Image (tube, rainbow, N blue to C red):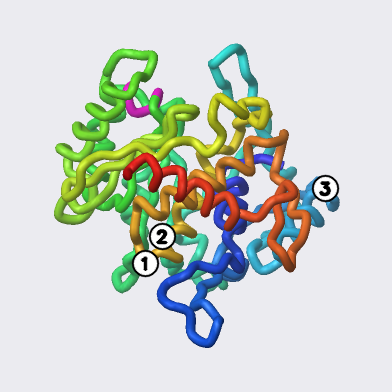
Amino acid sequence: IGGGGTYAAIGARIWYFIPVKTGPQLKGIAFSFRLPPNKIGMIVDTGNDFPQDIKDKLHSYGSEMWLFREQPNRGTTRALNSYRGDHRGFEYTTPRIRLTPKDLRNTKLEKPEFLHFICSPTRALSIIAEIDDGWSPTTIYEPIPDRCVPQELPSLIKVLPSISVLSPNAEEALSLLSLPLPPVKSTIESAARRFLDLGVGRNGQGWVIIRSGAMGAFIQSNGTEGRWIEAYWTKENIDKVVDVTGAGNAFLGGLAAGMALSEGDIPTATLYATVSASFVIEQEGLPPLDSINGNIWNGESASQRLDALRKRHESKAD
C-alpha cells in the first residue's frame, strides 16, 4: 500500500486516543484529548482491480477514515518507487486521478480543519484557488520532489502567503533555492530563513519545517528562533530504520494531529510528527496496529515515544 496521502493519514491516525495532560489532576483523573479516526479523512479511488485485501487493511485502521469512490470503468492508480543509493525515483505506471478541494464538496470530508497536499508549486496555486470563502483551513504544503527545481520558485513565491506550514525535505529545499548539496545544518537553517523572507503564511506568520532525515527537522517562523527537533531513532539504534518510504508524509500527518491536540503549537506538534515518522520507518509498508484499544503500534504506544522524545529535548535544554 503506497501513496503520500495514505502515509499522511496513518501518521495522523497514530494519535487516536492518546492522553495529553493539560493541567492538574482532578480526583485522580487527568484531562485528556483524543483524535478519533473520523477526524481524519482521505479519498480513495478504487478501480475495477482494487484488491480486497488492501481495502480490508485500510479498514483495520478505522473505516471512518476512508471515503472510497468506485471507478468501475478504469483500473486502480499504481506507481513505482525505486531506489539507487540515496536517489529515489517515483513514477506512475497507470493513469492517475488528480484530487482537488472540489472533490471534498458534499462529502463527509467537506471543509476540514487541516489540508495537507503534495504537488508542484504551480499546482498548489490552483489548489489554493479552490478553497471556498468561509473555509480557512490550516494548509500544510509538501512540495513534490521532482518539481523542487529553481524554475518552480516563482510559483512557490506566489503561493507562500496562503501556506500555513511549508515543509520540503532538506534536498528539496536546497534545490528550490539553488543552494549547494549535500545538506548540512548551516545550509538548511539558511534555507529556512530565505523561505521566511519570501513571506510564508498570512502576514508572514507561517512556519517552515525542513525535514532532514537522520538530522531531524529544523523549524522556524518569523516570530521565533529556529530550532532543531532531533529524529526519534539515533545512531545508537539505526537498525530500527528499515525503509524510509512515506516517512515524510507520515511526519506531516502527525504534525497535523499534533497541531490539533496542542492548539496549534508547532514545536510540540513537531514532536508528534517525529514520533509518527518513527513508526513508519521500522518496516516496509504501513506500520501494524497491534491493539486498537491500547493504540499499540509495533509493540509500543505513541504516547510512550512522545514522552521519551520530549524528555530527551528537555534534558538537552537544561
Residue at coordinates 71% horizontally, 56% vertically from top-left? 296
In this picture, residue 140 sits left or right of residue 81: left
Q: Which residue is mark 2?
A: 259
Q: Nearer the viewer, residue 217 or 132?
A: 217
Work out how far the residue at label 3 is from the one at label 2, CA to CA, in angstroms.
34 Å
Disc 3 residue type?
Pro
For the residue carrying disc 3, how many other residues have a C-alpha within 10 Å: few (<14), some (14-19), or many (20+)?
few
**Which percent across, then down, holds residue 125?**
32, 46
Disc 1 residue type?
Glu
Residue 263 numbered tag: 1
Above or below 93: residue 67: below
Q: Which residue is mark 3?
A: 51
Q: Is residue 80 visible?
A: no
Give the residues in magenta: 171-175
Does 223 lie within the magenta span? no
**Which percent across, then down, holds residue 240?**
66, 31
Work out how far the residue at label 3 is from the one at label 1, CA to CA, in angstroms.
38 Å
Q: Secondary structure at mark 2?
A: helix
- Mark whose residue sits in front, 3 or 2: 2
Residue at coordinates 40% horizontally, 44% vertically from top-left? 315
The C terminus lies in quadrant? top left
